[in-house]
Amino acid sequence: MGNNANAIQMLQQQRLLLQLEYETEKEAYRQQTESIGIGRKVKRGDAWWPLRVGKSYYNSLNQLAVEVYRTTDNDIEHNFEFGRPVMFFAHDNASDTKAPTIRYFRFAGVVSYVDGDRMVVTVPDNAPLIDLQGTENVGVQLSFDETSYRLMMEALDRAIRGKGRMGYLRDLFYNKNVKPETFTFQPMHFPYLNRTQEQAVNEVLRAKDVAIVHGPPGTGKTTTLVEAIRETLMRESQVLVCAQSNMAVDWISEKLVDRGINVLRIGNPTRVNDKMLSFTYERRFEGHPDYPQLWALRKAIRDLRSHRKRGDEKYHQNLESLKSRATELEIRINSELFGEARVIASTLVGAANRLLGGQKYATLFIDEAAQALEAACWIPLRRVSRVVLAGDHCQLPPTVKSIAALKAGLGKTLMERIVETHPETVTLLKIQYRMNDDIMRFSSNYFYNGQVESAPEVRFRGILDLDTPMTWIDTSEFSENSEDSELSFKEEFVGESFGRINTNEAMLTLHVLQNYFSKIGRQRLLDERIDVGIISPYRAQVQLLRRMLMKREYFKPFRRLISVNTVDGFQGQERDVIVISLVRSNDEGQIGFLRDLRRMNVAITRARMKVIILGDRQTLTRHPFYRQLWKYITQLNHTNYEDNLTDSTDDCPNSDESDGTAV
């Protein structure tokens, strides 16, 4: 009984922390809405303004939808995607006498999908769309996401009360003494997988309760997961596949479809193309042969409601008759679509969709599980009897806004918890196919106990002969050697939200890249499509670098080959060359959230052939991780480096709680 009580206590603690996170985020949203101007929201990608409002119609799921078009700032990356709640507003221009005012419309909407500069938003049936279509200077902005929090709270409550299979899994996850059960059978052989991938698939098939596939960068986690799902479907009629983000769900769904598996995607994809849309529930629903008949019935219901005559005694009778025929048809179409699908795919929050009401599955696969709050994982867990988690808890963690909640453990994921309590459920994928060995080795030694090795075909990957795969350009040397204060490489704050930038470091970043491009040669860059990622942990620095890049004539022919983004923006991606601008440079040795070393792991391991880091060595190397990285790169560049790092650390170091002051 004690074990049960411990699990319940821990989940109650999670619920309190989630409540704290909810209140923090809601308050931050309120303050932001009151203080940040519309122009700033547009720049951050959280609003479109001004809009052109297009037609409204009922979609195939019988929701009232309205189309809107963005008319300016088309190059800004925005944050609108399926399922996100939005609000419409009218922005009255300031006259000489009055400041501009913002008036919000009194109905909420939800993004159905976004395609370039066109967005479809579903709204309540009674939403006054005529007002919206008749108003000038209309915009749309993201609003606070109450629904996700409500669903996560409900999921934790269900886990706390859980009996039967759910109660068993809850107690297992939190208790070292309860051992996960497994089947026993001879290992199966998969000729197109390497030995650790093969082992991972076998462990997934043997697990009765839980299995974890730990995939460091470039080790083929998705390939392994797709194979595990295929093999599971040899034994089960249907599985549930979830991930934290829409993008991750799209990625795994696309790979499954490529292997000929019938996927039914609940929700709309982030990239709207025919291939991706073809396996969405909405597109399949309207493609069903019975759909035209259902559409006619729904139209008849709407017509009957809008033309209701006083004293019409047959009104209710006719309405009920039409509604029951429509419901019957809808149930029939649904059961056919769900009946023929082998994989049901959705985000973790999307697994609460009413379409899945009452559905049960033997197995749940959660991809990118190390990026999901534990509460979100409990949403689909109610529907299944075993779970397979795939991800890497040494890469990006979940986003937590409340510092107090983060310190008290809200950022600890279900995957991390199970790795701690049941390490025997984990298979580490050990062969990577992305990076030059010198790039991989630092990450392998620091984060994966030296267990990850490079496949022979990538071990010596490189662009230039005799090039060193990793370079660190120390900006403190420039500051010291300069008498001119304008050439200082110190960080500074900008803008209303106090974004952190380092202007001279940004200029040097582009200068260094231009030099490297000159060595490679214009024609070769274009012919071989050598691509580059410029990464900075700070969003303000990313925007500064993007602006500078657009202005620099030299880079014009290479625009399509260069992308600039935050570490989070590069998650799951790779480039031939990665350039990292670390920004921090101060006399106190403060490095802020650069102490979350998982972010640095992600940044470095995006590169296939070359990593160039720009940063102030004096500021950064007060922290042991950056000191070790500097030492490693210095040794690499002196060619007689030793193979092993000296002070290796424990499994998946997260962040160093000391503030990086003098060591």
Image (cartoon, rainbow, N blue to C red):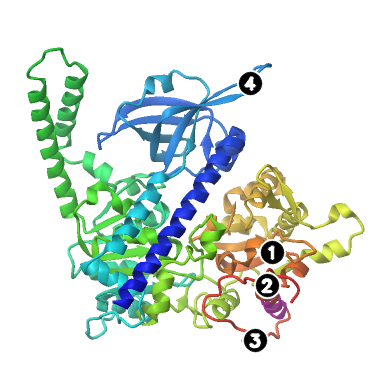
Residue depth check, mark 1 versus mark 3: number of the one nearer the observer: 1
Q: Residue at x 59, y 58 (%)?
A: 533
**Dot 1 surroundings within 10 Å: few (below 14), some, or many (20 or more)?**
many
Q: Which residue is mark 3?
A: 646
The answer to whether 352 appears left or right of 491 in the picture is: left
Q: Which residue is mark 2?
A: 626
Q: Earlier in the sequence, mark 2 or mark 3?
A: 2
Contact flag, marks 1 and 2 (Cβ < 8 Å): yes
- Which residues are drawn in magenta? 628-637
Spatial separation of the CA atoms under disc 1 and disc 4: 42 Å
The answer to whether 157 appears left or right of 534 in the picture is: left
Residue 236, horizontal then vertical, whole percent: 18, 67
Which amino acid, by three-letter code, is at mark 3?
Answer: Thr
Contact flag, marks 1 and 3 (Cβ < 8 Å): no
Q: Which residue is mark 1?
A: 591
The answer to whether 420 appears left or right of 41 in the picture is: left
Q: Earlier in the sequence, mark 1 or mark 3?
A: 1
Q: Quadrant of the C terminus?
A: bottom right
Q: Earlier in the sequence, mark 3 or mark 4?
A: 4
